[in-house]
Image: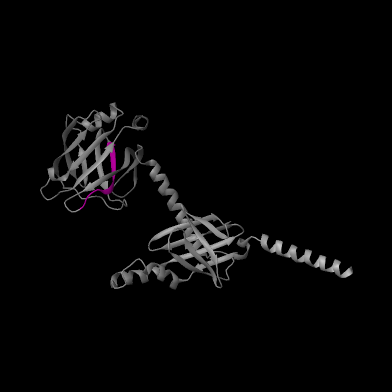
């Protein structure tokens, strides 16, 4: 009888131990800081390039050398940064145990974390891409990675604010030739447009429209906002305007110092006058070939009043 009681208690203890082991969250077993094995990174990226292309192979080596892949799992959260081939991805997600898998969110996608002997295998969902992550002795992300995260968050915030400002009229300060503020300001608006020429089609550009003393100026920048598009200098051309009712008109425009100017001396001033008095959207086409036979560039964009009245007031 006594032996039966002992055996019963033993099996109860064994069953309790099994239940506790089964109920343990697998996320608890992978706490720590992980970095990518760069040989694994290279193997993943090599699948996407032609191995016989020497230039691509050299660029790949540079990308791997400069790559940062550092993640920290603490509690049920993971954060860190992936910088690879010029692209930065911030990781800030809950770590979820789902159907015997450990899942995290990476942007709009998911990734899986599979424990192994040296750390984790990072598997990108719905692809055959995976990277080996090695567990380090660190207790926190490196200072370099922390700083990179701060800078990336700042850049993403600025980018979001820029996107939200597109199409809205604003006030900017006028500066002198030394870059000092003059105490005067002007009204401007930035929006997207498209560019084509004899060798390329439908490239994205940014157009800056500004108003100074009843004159309307256009400046066009490349897709990274780093360089102005090149215009003829001290030449007249034409700009086509399509009004909301379908009417198409043309007027003279002056190119000067990489700006296209709707001159206040021109009696038409079709664009400026329409913006002041109407809310509809104008479709505009600047064709540089109307000013010079050496240019085939065309820029197309739309412009409308939006909040212009409030800004002018």
Colour scheme employed for the rendering of this structure = one colour
- The secondary structure that most of the magenta stretch takes on is strand
Q: Is residue 99 visible?
A: yes
Q: Is residue 251 left or right of residue 144?
A: left
Residue extending farthest to the left is 293
Q: Residue at x 71, y 62 (%)?
A: 20
**Left or right: 266 in relation to 186:** left
Asked if 239 appears above or below 224 in the picture, the reply is above
Could you tell me if residue 144 is visible in this image?
Answer: no
Where in the figure is residue 164, as x and y percent of width and height?
40, 42
Residue at 43% from the left image edge and 51% from the top image edge: 156
Q: Quadrant of the N terminus?
A: bottom right
Nearer to us in this view, 73 or 225 = 73
Q: In terms of depth relative to the viewer, which is nearer, 102 or 63?
A: 102
Residue 289 coordinates in the image, percent (x, y):
13, 45
Q: In the image shown, does 304 or 313 lie closer to the viewer?
A: 304
Q: Tell me the magenta residue range.
A: 200-211
Q: Which residue is nearer to you in this view: 232 or 304?
A: 304
Q: Residue at x 57, y 61 (%)?
A: 73
Quadrant location of residue 42?
A: bottom left
Q: Is residue 206 a member of the stretch shown in magenta?
A: yes
Indicate the quadrant containing the C terminus: top left, top right, bottom left or bottom right. top left
Q: Position of residue 90 (x, y in %)?
A: 47, 57
Above/below status of 175 relative to 12: above
């Amino acid at each position: 009888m006594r032996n039966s009681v002992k055996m019963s208690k033993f099996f109860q203890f064994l069953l309790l131990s099994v239940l506790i082991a089964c109920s343990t969250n697998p996320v608890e077993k992978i706490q720590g800081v992980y970095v990518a094995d760069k040989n694994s990174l290279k193997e993943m990226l090599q699948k996407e390039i032609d191995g016989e292309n020497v230039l691509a192979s050299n660029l790949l080596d540079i990308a791997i050398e400069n790559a940062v892949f550092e993640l920290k799992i603490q509690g049920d959260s993971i954060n860190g940064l992936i910088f690879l081939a010029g692209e930065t991805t911030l990781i800030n997600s809950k770590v979820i145990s789902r159907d015997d898998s450990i899942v995290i969110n990476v942007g709009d996608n998911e990734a899986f974390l599979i424990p192994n002997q040296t750390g984790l295998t990072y598997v990108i969902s719905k692809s055959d891409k995976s990277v080996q992550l090695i567990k380090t002795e660190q207790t926190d992300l490196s200072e370099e990675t922390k700083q990179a995260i701060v800078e990336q968050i700042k850049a993403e915030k600025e980018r979001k604010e820029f996107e939200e400002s597109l199409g809205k009229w604003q006030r900017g300060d006028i500066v002198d030739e030394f870059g000092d503020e003059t105490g005067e300001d002007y009204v401007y608006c930035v929006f997207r447009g498209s560019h084509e020429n004899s060798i390329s089609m439908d490239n994205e550009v940014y157009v800056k429209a500004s108003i100074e003393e009843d004159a309307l100026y256009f400046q066009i920048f490349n897709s990274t906002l780093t360089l102005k598009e090149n215009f003829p200098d001290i030449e007249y051309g034409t700009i086509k305007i399509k009004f909301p009712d379908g009417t198409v008109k043309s007027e003279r425009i002056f190119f000067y110092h990489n700006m296209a100017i709707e001159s206040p001396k021109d009696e038409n001033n079709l664009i400026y006058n329409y913006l002041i008095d109407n809310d509809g959207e104008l479709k505009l086409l600047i064709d540089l070939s109307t000013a010079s036979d050496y240019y085939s560039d065309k820029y197309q964009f739309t412009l409308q009043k939006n909040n212009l009245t409030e800004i002018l007031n």
